[in-house]
Amino acid sequence: MAPEPITADYIYRRIRHEIVEGAFAPGAMLKLSRLTDQFGASATPVRDALNRLVGERLVVLLPGGGFRVRKLDADRLAGLYRWHGHLIQFAHERPLPESARKGLGALKHEALEPGTGGRSVRKTIRHPGLIPAQ
């Protein structure tokens, strides 16, 4: 099978994956020259990918150009935990097959009580729309 062509979408998915996986720490500068070298692409598709991530609020566009990974402060992190808990609660209240409900019951408990096993939540949830495939 031929390798995937280097496009703005491909670069976007790779950078997004690296941010989500922690390869780029919150607040880290994303150097355009480094990323163009890493992907073997011109600046245009890399810049397009970064601007798309700005739209998703994972990356911040700096005044005068340049990009950095968005920092997580305590309020934003608490809001993400609340949102995640509501999302799990919403999914849990919908009719699902019994096999799916068992897994969500465990996730509901962990999601609503941060720090009680959040690491296992990431390993348990495997849905392409929620967490990128590895």
Image (cartoon, grey):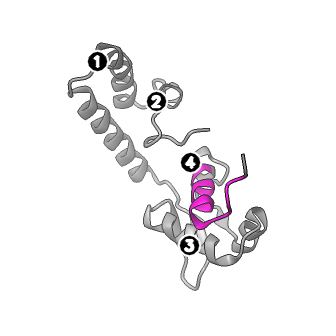
Q: Secondary structure at mark 3?
A: helix
Q: Label 3 is placed on what type of residue?
A: Asp
Residue at screen point 77% across, 62% down? 38
**Real-space Cα distance between discs 1 and 4?**
30 Å
Q: Secondary structure at mark 1?
A: loop
Q: Residue furthest bottom?
A: 64
Disc 3 or 2, which lies upstream in sequence?
Answer: 3
Q: Is residue 94 magenta?
A: no
* Image: magenta residue range: 3-17
Badge 1: residue crowd in 10 Å (few <14, some 14–19, many ≥20): few
Closest to the camera, between mark 2 and mark 1, is 1
Closest to the camera, between mark 3 and mark 2, is 3
Residue 123: image x %, image y %? Answer: 54, 27
Q: Residue furthest front?
A: 1
**Real-space Cα distance between discs 3 and 2?**
30 Å
Disc 2 or 4, which lies upstream in sequence?
Answer: 4
Q: Label 1 is placed on what type of residue?
A: Pro
Q: Is residue 5 magenta?
A: yes
**Which of the 4 quarters of the picture holds residue 13?**
bottom right
Disc 3 or 4, which lies upstream in sequence?
Answer: 4
Q: Indicate left or right for 102 with 119 as reference.
A: left
Mark 2 = which residue? Answer: 125
**Which of the 4 quarters of the picture holds residue 86?**
top left
Residue 72: image x %, image y %? Answer: 49, 54
Closest to the camera, between mark 1 and mark 4, is 1
Please report contact status of discs 1 and 4: CB closer than 8 Å, yes or no.
no
Q: Label 4 is placed on what type of residue?
A: Val
